[in-house]
Image (tube, rainbow, N blue to C red):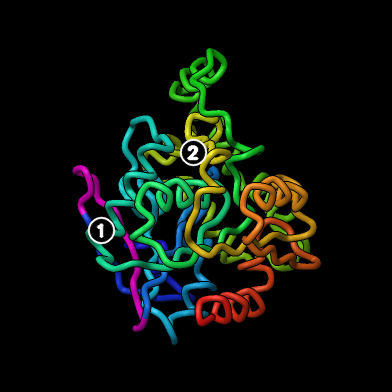
Amino acid sequence: MSSLAKPPVNALTSIWMWRGQRVHYARRGQGEPVLLIHGLNAAASAYEMRKVFLGLEDAFDVIAPDLPGFGASERRRMDYTAALYTDFILDFCRERIGAPCHAIASSLGAAYVIRAACLAPELFQKLTLIAPTGIRALADERPTLGKRIARRILFSPAGTLLFKLLGARVAIRYFMTTQGFHDARNFTRDYEDHIYDTMRAKNAKYAPIAFLTGMANCNVSQLFGRLSAPTRLVWGKNAQTTPARQAADFLARKPDARLVLFDACALLPHDEHADQFNWMVKEFLRE
């Protein structure tokens, strides 16, 4: 079932066979289609977008897939790359949505949406990009020797042990309360349980390995300025992993993009300040 099939969303699950893999996604609401693309990390899934899904379904046709290798989607022992995820987004837009859509995407997922929107601008309307990467952070796509060695180690039993350590509750709480959220009280036990469970799924480590080693990096430094879609950049002022000052790299390439900063917020403004975020998105999409 989709990562959004459980509370608080309780969405019906749809399955799409893409390149022979099962991809789970949730869809609900009526109106213009809005595609939600989660970021990449050791426990990524559409659950990250649950509050956006709930906040927009009253006015839009909201669609949120678990990207291949993450969440409830099939997790194969394979290499996951920027090219694969860009192809997935393009195919999903064409075959599952079938009309130009708005997109809301986070972190590295936002970089994939940028690339997809440059390759097929006719598929996209407006873009909301949350702490996007691809110019400074997570931009080096070169298959360096170091990346290949790290991949080999992480694919081994030693890598399985390391991934289990990363998935320990103490490690989950530490990262999410020091990097994910500005206010640790916003990291709920339900969110912790979801991360803990998803990191223990069969073959859970393989897609995260691509993120951890940089094999899934996506460089958009030459692409962002070519975007024709109206674009809003969203950042938490207290983000550390991808700090808000990196917004300048994007604005320098596309001065007509608008930046929205959230006070008392780290990497997840769409979670930590969900009501304000959803109001801002609705206003932007209705302009």
- Per the rendered image, the range of residues in magenta is 17-31
User: Residue 47, percent across and down?
Assistant: 49, 62
State the residue at coordinates (50%, 53%). Answer: 227
Describe residue 202's horizontal placement relative to residue 258 as left or right.
left
Q: Furthest residue to the bottom? A: 58
Is 18 placed above or below 81 here?
below
State the residue at coordinates (35%, 68%). Answer: 26
Residue 214 falls in which quadrant of the image?
A: top right
Which element is circle 1 on? Answer: helix
Describe residue 190's horizontal placement relative to residue 202 as left or right.
right
User: Residue 221, percent across and down?
Assistant: 58, 39
Mark toward the start of the polypeptide (2 vs 1): 1
Foreground residue among 181 and 195: 181
**Residue type, mark 2 in image:** Pro
Foreground residue among 118 and 196: 118
State the residue at coordinates (45%, 36%). Answer: 205
Residue occupied by mark 2: 208
Residue occupied by mark 1: 94
User: Residue 103, percent across and down?
Assistant: 45, 64
User: Residue 74, percent across and down?
Assistant: 30, 47
Foreground residue among 70 and 38: 38
Foreground residue among 133 and 75: 133
Q: Is residue 197 visible?
A: no
Can residue 22 be found in the magenta stretch? Answer: yes
**Residue type, mark 1 in image:** Arg
Is 255 placed above or below 142 here?
below
State the residue at coordinates (35%, 39%). Answer: 84
| Disc marking residue 81 | none
